[in-house]
Image: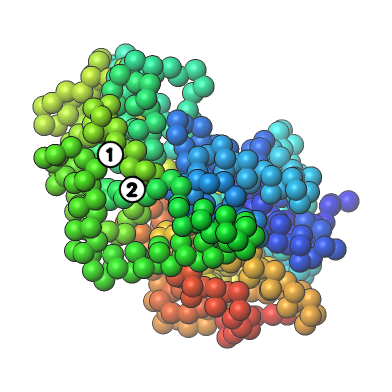
């Protein structure tokens, strides 16, 4: 007999553990399980093992709303975040509901039975379960491979080529020349972290990224903790940081020249006198058109100032036996080359969906409130903000799913499905973001609409009102028994 689960969660990372915690707390009699394709809790924070891995958001907002972050560091390292996620799962007993090594490959909805039939691979076996509600918390990129452009001449290079997504445990870069290709969050983390042991680290970028320094330890937040304790200070610090990030983002959109001026002034103070900021730290786009990188305590700028790291802005012509030849004609010597060149997107972990025998084409669906799919019943997914911490949105999605399930219980409904009845509704990409990793694959994802409830909101304060407290019934959401 096929096992039945009330709510099946896909993914045991930051989102999946948070979703399970809220469902268990609000529906203690409901059965749930988490299918996790890997063999450990933590998702991104367990997968990435490169030197210096850390959050690119403060932990007051990257942490769960229901569990205060108590470490002094607001910009935390990967192992600390991983421990936080695992402790959250263990303390609530959620770890006992995780089925590791279960990769969900197909989910089929039957309107006649009002349930999903979900297939997962587990080693050489196929596991089949049914569930009333399917909740995907798998993020939006591939775990099995990162993105690396086709560089000419890689086979000639006599050193080591490494992608951060698959960092080798045996890599010793002590006293070696390292080139990190890239300019995003991974690159600006790797460069100062590796510079402590390497002879020299060069960040090679095609074009600059906006980079801002923040203190790793927030004195205001830590002062509130000492005064009020963890439980009372946490929501205050959380909203303080939400307000700061919101104001920064809005100011970047409305007064980009002012934000550029401020960032430049800060970089002039942090970098050596006369440093070429125009070439290496002044992008061609406006702040927050792409995600801004944070460097705790200005560690990247400090490594440059101390001569342990440098930035080169150029394009690669070819790999050589001893390093890289650039289009300018310059050469970069290297013993180790790290390709911090980005991610490959993957919608919903690559799961195939079907509704009543009809295959679901994701690009033909619309995202309802940024968390459900048009004409796909009893289904939700998590996609975080591009301009704020991922967990802010993940918490709200879990809130909404719990409210939705409770509403269905009260009303005696067994099915909920958003449906778009406006043929004139204009659409846009799910992630309207200029980053290269988004632009490469966004056409394989669902789309959003230009008006509610089909818009993907990027304002946490607005979403708190609409998702945590707003109406559950509208013209688009259809309920039935």
Q: Nearer the viewer, residue 98 or 178?
A: 178
**Cα–Cα gap, marks 2 and 1:** 9 Å
Q: Residue at x 24, y 50 (%)?
A: 266
Q: Which mark is residue 191?
A: none
Mark 1 lies on residue: 301
Q: Is residue 450 left or right of residue 3?
A: left
Kindly indicate whether the residue at mark 1 contacts the one at mark 2 (C-beta within 8 angstroms).
Answer: yes
Q: Quadrant of the C terminus?
A: bottom right
Residue 137 vs residue 129: left or right? Answer: left
Residue 104 seen in this snapshot: no
Is 86 left or right of 411, judged from the image as shown? left
Q: Position of residue 175 (x, y in %)?
A: 34, 15
Q: Residue furthest front?
A: 227
Q: Under tag 2, what secondary structure? A: strand
- Secondary structure under tag 1 reads helix
Q: Which quadrant of the figure has residue 87?
A: top right
Q: What is the residue that sits farthest to the bottom in this orientation?
A: 475
Q: Residue at left 54%, top 73%?
A: 464
- Residue at 64% over, 74% down: 417
Look at the picture and state if 336 lies above or below 9.
Answer: above
Q: Which mark is residue 213?
A: 2
**Residue 262 image point, x, y percent:** 23, 58
């Amino acid at each position: 007999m096929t096992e039945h689960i009330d709510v099946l969660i896909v993914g045991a990372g930051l989102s999946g553990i948070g979703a399970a915690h809220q469902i268990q707390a609000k529906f203690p009699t409901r059965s749930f399980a988490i299918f996790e394709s890997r063999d450990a809790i933590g998702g991104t924070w367990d997968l990435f093992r490169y030197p210096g891995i850390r959050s690119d958001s403060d932990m007051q907002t990257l942490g769960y709303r229901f569990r205060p972050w108590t470490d002094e560091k607001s910009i935390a390292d990967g192992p600390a975040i991983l421990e936080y996620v695992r402790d959250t799962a263990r303390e609530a007993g959620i770890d006992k509901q995780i089925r590791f090594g279960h990769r969900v490959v197909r989910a089929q909805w039957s309107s006649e039975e009002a349930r999903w039939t979900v297939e997962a691979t587990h080693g050489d076996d196929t596991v089949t379960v049914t569930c009333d509600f399917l909740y995907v918390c798998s993020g939006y990129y591939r775990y099995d491979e990162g993105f690396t452009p086709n560089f000419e001449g890689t086979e000639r290079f006599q050193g080591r080529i490494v992608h951060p997504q698959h960092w080798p445990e045996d890599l010793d870069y002590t006293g070696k020349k390292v080139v990190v290709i890239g300019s995003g969050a991974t690159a600006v983390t790797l460069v100062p972290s590796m510079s402590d042991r390497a002879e020299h680290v060069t960040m090679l970028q095609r074009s600059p990224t906006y980079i801002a320094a923040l203190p790793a330890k927030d004195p205001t937040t830590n002062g509130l903790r000492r005064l009020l304790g963890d439980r009372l200070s946490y929501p205050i610090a959380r909203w303080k940081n939400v307000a700061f990030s919101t104001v920064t983002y809005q100011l970047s959109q409305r007064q980009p020249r002012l934000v550029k001026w401020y960032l430049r002034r800060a970089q002039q103070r942090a970098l050596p006198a006369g440093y070429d900021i125009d070439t290496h730290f002044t992008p061609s786009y406006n702040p927050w058109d792409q995600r801004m990188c944070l460097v705790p305590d200005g560690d990247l700028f400090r490594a440059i100032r101390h001569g342990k790291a440098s930035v080169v802005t150029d394009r690669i012509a070819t790999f050589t036996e001893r390093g890289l030849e650039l289009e300018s004609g310059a050469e970069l010597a290297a013993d180790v080359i790290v390709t911090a060149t980005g991610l490959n997107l993957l919608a919903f972990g690559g799961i195939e969906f079907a509704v009543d025998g009809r295959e679901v084409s994701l690009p033909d669906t619309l995202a309802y409130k940024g968390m459900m799919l048009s004409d796909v019943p009893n289904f939700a997914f998590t996609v975080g903000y591009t301009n704020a911490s991922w967990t802010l949105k993940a918490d709200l999605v879990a809130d909404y799913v719990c409210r939705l399930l409770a509403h269905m219980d009260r009303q005696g409904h067994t099915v909920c499905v958003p449906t778009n009845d406006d043929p004139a509704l204009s659409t846009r990409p799910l992630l309207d973001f200029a980053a290269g990793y988004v632009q490469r694959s966004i056409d394989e994802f669902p789309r959003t609409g230009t008006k509610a409830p089909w818009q993907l909101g990027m304002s946490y304060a607005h979403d708190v009102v609409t998702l945590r407290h707003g109406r559950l019934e509208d013209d688009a959401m259809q309920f039935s028994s």
